Image (tube, rainbow, N blue to C red):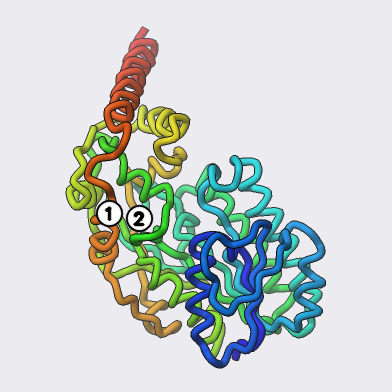
Amino acid sequence: MASVVLVTGVSRYMGGVFARALGAVDSVERIIGVDVVPPPHPIGRTEFVRADIRNPMIGKIIGQAGVDTVVHMNVIATPLSAGGRVSQKEINVIGTMQLLAACQKAEGLQRLVVKSSAAVYGSSPRDPAMFTEEMSPKALPRAGFGKDSVEVEGYVRGFARRRPDVGITTLRLANIIGPGIRTSMTDYFALPLIPAPLGFDARLQFVHETDAASCLVLAATGPKAVGNVNVAGAGVITLMQAAAMVGRPIFPVPLPAAGFLGGVVKRAGLADFSDDQMQYLAFGRGLDTTRMREVLRFEPLYSTRAAFLDFAPHVTAVIPGAASAVSVVQGAAGSAANALVHALNGRGA
């Protein structure tokens, strides 16, 4: 049973939601939240300690506080919020290495909970209808958050071999959505004109932000650690259905040009997208959540559709600068189409 819990990434939105939810558990005596900047939101009874998990000082904090449970929330999905891709990778990968090195030396540590992502499965046309936790990706993520998550899980497996006495739960969360959180996916569906791969209608799964926090609390305080667990709301929705829910028109883009267009949208500051995310918007991904229900004993309050519907009203009907955003997307799409035509002509020459 968790008594003294250390939470990384407490100054990020989901870190704050989790800290407040964990604070409601009476059996948890003390909660220590660490991050490099003070939290801009309430964190309940969590004690904030300014610390960088990339610094060996994190080991002293764990040892001196007698931490028995570590919840690693500081795997960052969006490079812009981390100060760029280089900083994102350092925090995600180097930070995890340093944190696990500190955990390895902590004799009193009993449990490690890692907030991972379904992005570890990648997305390709050869994927199964539903990924179980034992399945490997058909196409590994090539860059960005997905690649970082694969590396993070690799380090966690190494830690498990070195410290078999520590119970580990790794939650592979579907895209988190809700009225308060901001991610690359929420930014995407807030675009006034949504670029979508031509000829595809991907299956999407989401988990509501409150369900994600509740699942993390259960993983930290439940009777036992359960290994890798997929976490998602029941059911799926398609990309076209999601666009209709937020009242946005679709702008079809040939898949070979979608990555280029995503880069233009990212540089324009409209949404934070990578090539892997554009692949996901073409092929989608399905998660088998049997272990979530039967082993972790967690049942989300929100289905995928209900979670998205709770988010949809918070997407403003009229976005400031919408006209310029549309012109950026349309201009980029035109450039991408021209580049594709030239490439095809070049192949035929």
Kindly check if marks 2 and 1 are in contact, taking CB atoms under 8 A apart as contact: yes
Q: In the visual, does 109 lie left or right of 112? A: right
Q: In the visual, does 93 lie left or right of 78? A: right
- Of helix, strand and loop, which one carries label 2? loop
Q: Identify the mark at residue 246; answer none if there is no mark.
A: none
| Residue 153 can be seen in this image | no
**Can you identify the residue that label 1 sits on?**
203
| Quarter of the C terminus within the rendering | top left
Q: In the visual, does 134 lie left or right of 63? A: left
Q: Where on the picture, by quarter, is residue 113?
A: bottom right
Above-or-below relation of 302 to 77: below
| Mark before the other along the chain sequence, 2 or 1 | 1
Above-or-below relation of 195 to 343: below
Q: Amino acid at mark 1?
A: Arg
Q: In the visual, does 252 lie left or right of 130? A: left
Residue at image location 61% in from the left, 47% down from the top? 88
Q: Identify the mark at residue 285; answer none if there is no mark.
A: 2
The residue nearer to you, when weighing 171 against 41, is 41
